[in-house]
């Protein structure tokens, strides 16, 4: 009751609460940011090199397929290795492997990245069982070993991977975590469609941003920004994202995407899946 009388007699009831856009204007005014040109200036430094992964049509595996980047088929193994199994003893399904060719964006300490998955378990994040990443910091071709695909696993399509250099920018969902000023500025320039001007800048700088498989760059989110954080609270770097790929016959839920994030200092890898 006292709070009501306080507002009545202090005149506070005539003061409208500031909208978040008004608060954004105040924040940006202090930074001297108010125009579309300012937005371009905020976005350009965010440009990051990445590599688009192109999953080719299924084909017959070549003799040296273990030494190729590909989906399905035969993974690379060395002596003293076995086909990976889940904690319950079930054989993992091999999904893909990517070799570091010095130009495709994999970190120098990862010469080969392999991913295995249990579609029955269908894990969604790092805390779930049923997914496995194997990395090699060195390739020993003299120790290469052939391990046949377990018979209980369904046959997989062998699809070679090719690489295309691209440039990446955050999607609208992830922008605020990476550059709050760019997100706020796009919002005050068009309150009805706050993302519109940012997407216009992106299109002018790098073209249309679509869902795709890629190495590095920024994640393209389906269900909202979820980048894991490092111990110092900084965002982890996107290592690889893999789209649902028609050629390989891989579907992550309902037209979903899987993401791998990496801390180069600790070599920690985080995994997650999002879908519609």
Image (cartoon, grey):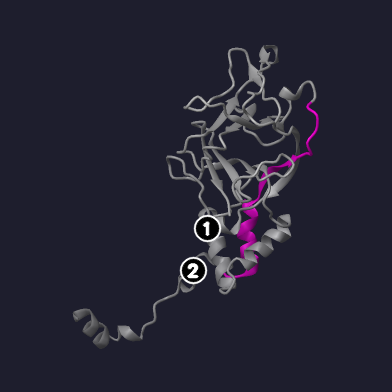
With 148 as the anchor, is 64 left or right in this view?
right
Q: What are the residue bounds of the magenta stretch?
A: 33-61
Query: Few, some or many C-alpha atoms within 10 Å of disc 2 (few <14, some 14-19, many ≥20)?
Result: some
In the image, is residue 40 part of the stretch drawn in magenta?
yes
Tell me, yes or no, whether the highlighted magenta stretch contains residue 46.
yes
From mark 1 to mark 2, how far is it between C-alphas?
12 Å
Tell me if I can see residue 255 in this picture: yes
- Residue 192 lies, with reference to residue 99, above or below; the image says below
Residue bearing the label numbered 1 = 176
Visible residue check, residue 33: no
Q: Position of residue 223 (x, y in %)?
A: 54, 55
Against 47, residue 185 (above or below) is: below
Q: Which part of the image, by quadrant, shows the C terminus?
A: bottom right
Question: Which residue is at the far front?
Answer: 152
- Residue 72 position (above or below residue 207): above
The nearer-to-camera label among 1 and 2 is: 1
Judge by depth and name the residue closer to the eye, 72 or 171: 72
Mark number, residue 24: 2
Q: Percent from the top left, x then y, of residue 162?
A: 76, 37
Label 2 sits on a secondary structure element that is: helix
């Amino acid at each position: 009751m006292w709070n009501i009388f306080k507002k009545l007699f202090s005149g506070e009831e005539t003061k409208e609460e500031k909208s978040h856009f008004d608060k954004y204007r105040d924040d940006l005014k202090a930074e001297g940011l108010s125009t579309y040109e300012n937005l371009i200036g905020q976005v350009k430094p965010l440009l990051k090199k990445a590599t688009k992964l192109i999953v080719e049509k299924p084909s017959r595996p070549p003799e040296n397929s273990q030494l190729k980047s590909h989906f399905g088929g035969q993974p690379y193994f060395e002596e003293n290795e076995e086909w990976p199994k889940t904690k319950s003893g079930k054989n993992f399904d091999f999904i893909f492997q990517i070799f570091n060719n010095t130009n495709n964006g994999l970190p120098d300490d990862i010469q080969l990245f392999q991913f295995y998955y249990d579609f029955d378990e269908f894990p969604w994040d790092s805390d779930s069982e049923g997914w496995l990443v194997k990395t090699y910091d060195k390739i020993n071709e003299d120790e290469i070993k052939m391990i046949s695909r377990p018979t209980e696993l369904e046959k997989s399509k062998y699809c070679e991977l090719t690489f295309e250099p691209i440039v990446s920018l955050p999607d609208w969902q992830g922008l605020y975590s990476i550059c709050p000023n760019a997100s706020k500025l796009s919002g005050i320039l068009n309150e009805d469609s706050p993302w519109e001007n940012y997407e216009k800048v992106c299109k002018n700088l790098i073209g249309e941003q679509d869902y795709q498989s890629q190495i590095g760059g920024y994640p393209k989110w389906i269900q909202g920004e979820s980048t894991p954080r490092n111990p110092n609270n900084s965002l982890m770097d996107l290592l690889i994202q893999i789209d649902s790929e028609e050629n390989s016959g891989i579907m992550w839920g309902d037209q979903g995407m899987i993401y791998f994030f990496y801390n180069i200092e600790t070599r920690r890898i985080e995994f997650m899946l999002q879908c519609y």
